Amino acid sequence: MGAMGLMGADVTTTPVDLLLRGATLVDGTGAPARPADLAVADGRVTVLPPGTAVTAAETLDVTGRVVTPGFIDVHTHSDALAAPFGGGTHTDGDALDELRLAPLLQGVTTEISGNCGISLFPALPGRLPELAEHLRVSFGLGPVLPAEDFDAFAAGQRPELRRNHIASLVGHGTLRAGVMGFEDRPPTGQELAAMCGLLDRALAQGAAGLSTGLIYPPGVYADTEEIVALAKVAARHGKPYVTHLRDEMSQVEKALEEALEIAVRSGAPLQVSHHKTAGRHAWGATLRTLPRLEQARAEGVDVLCDVYPYTAGSTVLHAMLPPWTSEGGPAALLERLRSKEVRDRIRADIAHGVEGWENTVGNGGWDLISVAAAPARRTAEGRRIADLAAERGADPVDLVCDLLLEAQGEVTIISHSMREDDVRRVLASPLSMIGSDGVPKPGRPHPRWAGSFARVLGHYGREQGLLPLELAVHKMTGLPAERFRLAGRGVVRDGAVADLVVLDPAAVLDGATFERPLLPPVGVEAVVVAGRVAVRGGRPTAIRAGEVVRVR
């Protein structure tokens, strides 16, 4: 009897679009690798015994190669890369297309955006100018206009630019900015109800969950009660609460307890974003945070986390400043930064700390922070803040304020703040999955955008033996698909969406470095997106088959 594929068609008698012959299949479940052939028809896959007779329009001989599900990047900030909202100099062109290609070339077929409380939707008409400024500063791609809701966000994605699929969380910071601006106060009952209503609508339309970024304005101004109320809405939809903790440095354990409290009180699954213990006062704290997560899970809390395989992070430069500087929004921030008295207060707060503020610089120093993207001063990109200030004979705070003023707030940075043993512990944890936390902006971005998945497979997997191949792939595919309810993705089985990666397990390795952050990996030979070959021989084809993924 023939092999029955999608809709009961017999692929041994019906021609298929694509056949991958001679694969070693690592299917995404964590199960041992096994030999198989893979037939693709109408964007879906059928798993066949090796050597099954099949007629195909195209056959790829993948003998000696591993085939996996397409990788799922659970944490990106790529929301605007294929949106029509831009009006600035970076809306299109070679620089942005290179950024769009970077995840695809390492096998990422689905990205989850809207992380850290920042999404391109939803928007109420009354706050559009202020919200648009917030998104411009966050994404750094010129003017970025918010979408009314998830439907509008999905409709706005430009298919000619979509190299892979995208899903999106609902950003709490966007909700808050859109309803109550950048005020440092609790919401009124009416304002909270408005936020809950917008969130409920977006989740019903197919958004993947709720995210917070509790170090970023305006999310930093929210208390636990506000987040619990919103997380209850996510829980009603069976979707996760995804959080950039209030502190990932000296108070990381206290911040983790807040996240667990929110999960328990709301009933929402908890996803701890890019889990780390950064800064000298938190080095080694993963010895406590990971057992705490395992304990909570044993007690019935549905908690998982994600991680990127580097000891440096990346974010916006204005997040290095105390929260009060951003009250009122980006325009108010920039106006404040002109004042000598404000700059003196910033210096004092960095030196002495502020209750409830993460204080990245106070936990590390300006010598650990380099400029990733500064459109108004390209010569600063790749340089350390401390070195730039020393060259000018300036105080680092003055240098930072001047940079932000020159760029109208659009500056991103890289912070070398973690320790290798902590990163390794999180990578190896059974609770972790892989996310790049990529911040794709022209300039000198963090290499994690182009290298995270190949780095886990090659450096940490094959070279260091931290993870067997099947487990590493599971952390990139089956585990995130289950967590975010991405139906038909993450596991290669009959009827699954034909998102596939062909790689050489003996060669796969990241190529991106801090000096050349968009160099592609080696060993990723082909990538199939929705049944169409988007990468062949390690090089992109003309195929753009990416779609917006709705989570129901």
Image (spheres, rainbow, N blue to C red):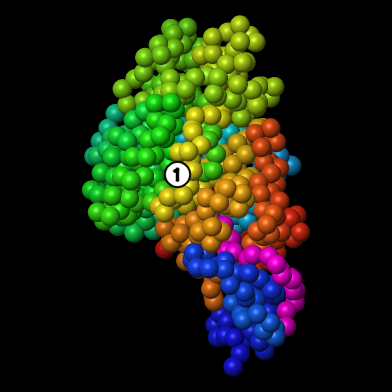
State which quadrant residue 219 falls in.
top left
Asked whether residue 161 is in view, the answer is no
Please state the horizontal and vertical placement of residue 62, each as a whole percent of the image.
Answer: 71, 68
Q: Is residue 6 visible?
A: yes
533 vs 191, left or right, is right
Which structural element holds mark 1? Answer: helix
The residue nearer to you, when weighing 320 against 175, is: 320
Residue under pointer 1:
425
- The residue located at (69%, 54%) in the rendering is 507
The image quarter containing residue 275 is top left
Query: Which residue corresponds to the image point at 67% horizontal and 84% vertical from the top-left?
Result: 52
Vertical order, 335 against 214 (above or below): above
Residue 76 on the magenta segment: yes
**474 shown above or below 427:** below
Locate residue 20 relative to residue 296 in the image: left or right.
right
Which residue: 34% across, 30% down? 251
Name the image quarter holding the C terminus: bottom left
Q: Residue at x 39, y 55 (%)?
A: 203
Q: Picture coordinates of residue 248 (x, y %)? A: 40, 34
Residue found at the far bottom of this picture: 1
The answer to which image quadrant residue 175 occupies is top left
